[in-house]
Image: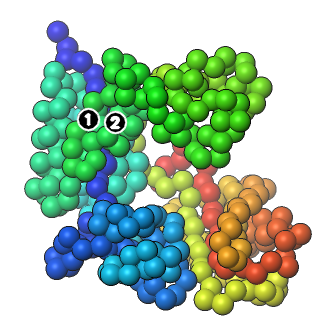
Amino acid sequence: MESPRWILHVDLDQFIAAVEVLRRPELAGKPVIVGGSGDPTQRGVVATASYEAREYGVQSGMPLRTAAKRCPDAVFLPSDPPAYDAASEVVMDTLREFPAVVEVMGWDEAFLEVRTDDPEGMAAEIADAVRSRTRLACSIGIGDNKLRAKLATGFAKPAGVFRLTEENWWPVMGDRPTDALWGIGRKTARKLAEMGITTVRELAATDARTLADRFGPTMGPWFRRIARGEDRSPVVSTPYVPRSRSRETTFQTNLTDWDEVRQEVVALARRVTADVVEEGRPAVRVAVKIRWAPFQTHTRSVPLPQPSSEAADIEAGALAALAKFEQERQRPVRLLGVRAEFASGGSR
């Protein structure tokens, strides 16, 4: 008889911070914050924080200056993507040595579809292999689908294993807030709360038509399905392909001249174009992100007339997206970003 099918979600613990600590062993056990230029007196945001720093309330996306106030004794380091690329590649190559379908989700996580009578035993073998090859720790969620495996990882952290299936779904998830679900953020949770829906169990019991009326015919019923732990998405072994390439700049002095904002967007678009050309795939959509002072962020995007890797097309798309902010041009700009998005399902 064939062994049962399981989905494992492997998530590297505090990945970026862990890679930095491996390069600087003297930082082990200390609060480490990675982001921007590594200078908390300059503008920038936290890319990641070690568990020691998180105990002080430091979170990803937080301004570095705020992080420094919360954790003044932290060690601040600049982000080093090539180092994280190299470490991630070793981890993913290690996962592919197991009898599994491996779907890479990014630097620090992957899904594995396996057939085994002992998923906890295989999870332990995987964690041991990753630690042996890289000295990095990982947490592993076990599920009967991808949704449950992903959520299980949260209960496994740090460096543990947890199983979440149909059998224990309600005892574990039923009374948790709706934003505990993978796919529901704080904004959606607030909208659900306005409907009197505050827990996973309550969302699962809500009529699908009621949710469709509020969130649309696709998203509404989908929220109900994930509240029940339902997920039929397959684990796909195609190589991980970025969905977009982006560049952004945080300004030490707010920009107040809209012509200067346009110039910076064009400069960022040119850098993104170089990334698109390197990627070898044309962009189909361009987005501009603006963070207004003090710290409010919005993004606008436009589709390109046709897929393109040409600088002129990407710059024109970026300026068209920027034009959508025209009515807010009097506000001081703290950060600008340009993102080129690729068609879904493409490969290099």
Who is closer to the viewer here, 135 or 92? Answer: 135
Q: Residue at x 28, y 47 (%)?
A: 157
Residue 3 shown left or right of residue 55 in the figure: left
Q: Residue at x 65, y 46 (%)?
A: 187
Secondary structure beneath label 1 = strand
Mark 1, residue position: 162
* Amino acid type, label 2: Ala
Does residue 92 appear in this view? no
Question: Residue 8: horizontal and vertical position, in percent?
Answer: 29, 35
| Quadrant of residue 78 within the rendered picture | bottom left
Who is closer to the viewer here, 215 or 65? Answer: 65
Crowd tier of the residue under label 1, counting other residues whose Cα lies within 10 Å: few below 14, some 14–19, many 20 or above: many
Q: Residue at x 24, y 18 (%)?
A: 4
Question: How does the figure colour the protein chain or chains?
Answer: rainbow
Mark 2, residue position: 152
Does residue 214 appear in this view? yes
* Quadrant including the N terminus: top left
